[in-house]
Amino acid sequence: MAFNDLREFLSALKGMGEAHEIEIPVDKEWEIGAICSENFRARGPALVFKKVDPYHTPLVVGVLGTVQRFSLALGVPPSLPAIYEKWFSVLSHPIQPKTVNNAPCKEVKLDEINLYKDPFPVPKWHPLDAGPELGTFHSVITRGPETHCMNCGMYRNQILDKDLLGIFFATSQRHIALHWEEWRKKGKPMPVAIAIGLDPYLTILSASRIPRSLSEYEVAGALMARPYEVVQAETADLWVPAHAEIIIEGEIPTDHLYPEEGPFGEFAGYMGPAQKNSQCIRVNKITHRRNPFFQGTYEGKFFNESKVVRSYLRSIYTLQFLKEVGIPGVKDVCVTPGGCSAFHTVVSMKKSYPAQAREVMALVLNQPNTFCKFCVVVDEDIDPWDPFQVEWAIATRFQASRDVMILENGKGTSMDPSQVPSKKGRTDLFGIDATAPIDEYKKEGADMPPLAGPTDEMMRTLREKWAKYGLR
C-alpha cells in the first residue's frame, strides 16, 4: 500500500497504535522539545500536538521514528536485506512524475508573509537554539539555471524575520550548493521552494543520497509504484509536491549573504555552531492545504526519525560500496543510530584471508561522502544491528595490540563535537578487527575454542516448533 500524503500515513500509524495525539496546550518555547526528547528516549510513538499555543495548526513529530514505521513506509519487513532489495530495485526503475493542475497544497494562498503566525507553530526545539527552526524534516527544492531536474534535500531553516529564513548548505558538494553556484555565475538569485508535511517517500529521499542523474520525484514514484504528483509553483519555475501540507516559495540571493545563522541543536546531540556569512531565503509566497499539519523533528542524542532514515540509507550505500569495490563475503552493514547515523559503522562478513578485515576498515573509513570515524568488523555469525552481539565479539575476539588500526588526521565533519575548533573537518579514524583470530591460533598449532550453544540444525528444528511451546 502506498501513502498519498502525510495524512494517510498518520492514519495508518494511528491504526497500529504508533501515533499519539496530545490534546492539552503545550508551550512551544520549551515544552515541545522536552516532550520530544523524552519520547524519543523511550522509543515512543509519533506525536501530534493539537494545541501549540497560540496556533491553530497541529504539529506532527516522529512519523518515521522507529524501524517499524520506516519499514511500513517502504512496504517491506524491518530488515536491511529487504530494505536494500527494495531501494536498489526502485533506483533501477524510476517513474517520471505526473503534473497536475489542481493540487491540495494550493487550497489556501497567502500573499501576506509572516512566518511567526499560522500555519507555522515552530517550536524552539532546544533551549540554546538561536531562534525557531522551521525546517527540520522537510524538503528544500531547487534546480540549476540550465536544467529542469529538481533536487529535493533537507537543509535547516531558521526563522530570521517574518519573511526571511536561513539555510545551511553544510558542504560545498551538496546539490543545493552546486545549484547556488551556477545561479551566482549567472548573476541571478536562485528560486527555491520548501515543502512541509510530506508523504514518507519524499521525506526519506530528501534526507538521503541518490545518484545525481535521478530526481527524488522519480524515485518517490518508484517507491509508490505510480507517478508522483507535482504542481507548478506559484512564483518560480519549480515543481512542488501536490499533496504537501505547506509550500513556501522564495529566492536565495547570490549577491549577498546573511551575517550569522544558528546555532542549532544538531544530529550529534550537541549545539552546532553559528554559521557566519550564510545563505538565506527571501520568502515571497505561501500556499497550504485547508487545516494543514506542520511537520518537524527533534534532533538530539536519542533515537529519532532522522537517525532511523540516515542509519538505514547509509548502511545500504556502504554495503553497496563494499560490493562494488569487490570485497567478497560481506553479509550486512550497520551505520549505527547510536553513532549519530554517521560516525560508527559495523560490518559483518565471512573472512577469506587474514588481512581482509583491515582492508574493509580502510575502505569504510575512507568511503566518499561519509563521515565514518569508527569501524568494527565482525564475523558473519554476528548481527551488526545488535549492540550486544557486537560488544560480545569485541570482548571475546579482539586484542588491542593486534586488532586496532588508527589513521590520523582523516576527513571529518565540522559537526563532530569531539574535535577542537582549530581541527574542525579533520578527525582520527579508528578500526577494530573483532573477527575470530583463527589464523593467530593456527600459528601456534591450536584452534579457537568451539562456540557454546545449540547447532544450526538444532535451531532450525526449534524454530519450526516454536509456536508449540506457547512462546512468542
Image (cartoon, grey):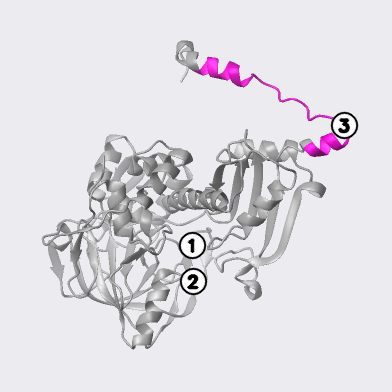
Whether residue 456 is visible: yes
In the orientation shown, which residue stands out farthest toward the right?
A: 444
Disc number at residue 333? none
The one of 344 and 231 positioned closer to us in this rendering: 231
Mark number displayed over residue 171: 2
> Of circles 1 and 3, which is in front?
3
451 in the magenta segment: yes
Amino acid type, label 2? Thr
Q: Nearer the viewer, residue 114 or 325?
A: 325
Distance (Cα) linking label 1 and label 3: 52 Å
Give the residue at mark 1. 266
**The disc label shown at residue 445, or none:** 3
Spot occupied by residue 214 in the image (x, y as percentages of width and height): 35, 61
Q: Secondary structure at mark 1?
A: loop
Please report the residue visible at 31 percent of the width from the left and 42 percent of the height from the top.
Answer: 20
Q: Position of residue 328 (x, y in %)?
A: 61, 44
The amino acid type of the residue labelled 1 equals Glu
Q: Which of the two discs, 1 and 3, labels the residue nearer the N terminus? A: 1
Which label lies toward us, 3 or 2? 3
Residue drawn at point x = 35 percent, y = 82 percent: 183
Quadrant where the image shows the N terminus = top left
Q: Amino acid at mark 3?
A: Gly
> Is 266 placed left or right of 92 in the picture?
right
Comes first in the chain, label 2 or label 1? 2
Q: Which residues are magenta?
A: 439-463
Image quadrant assignment for residue 421: bottom right
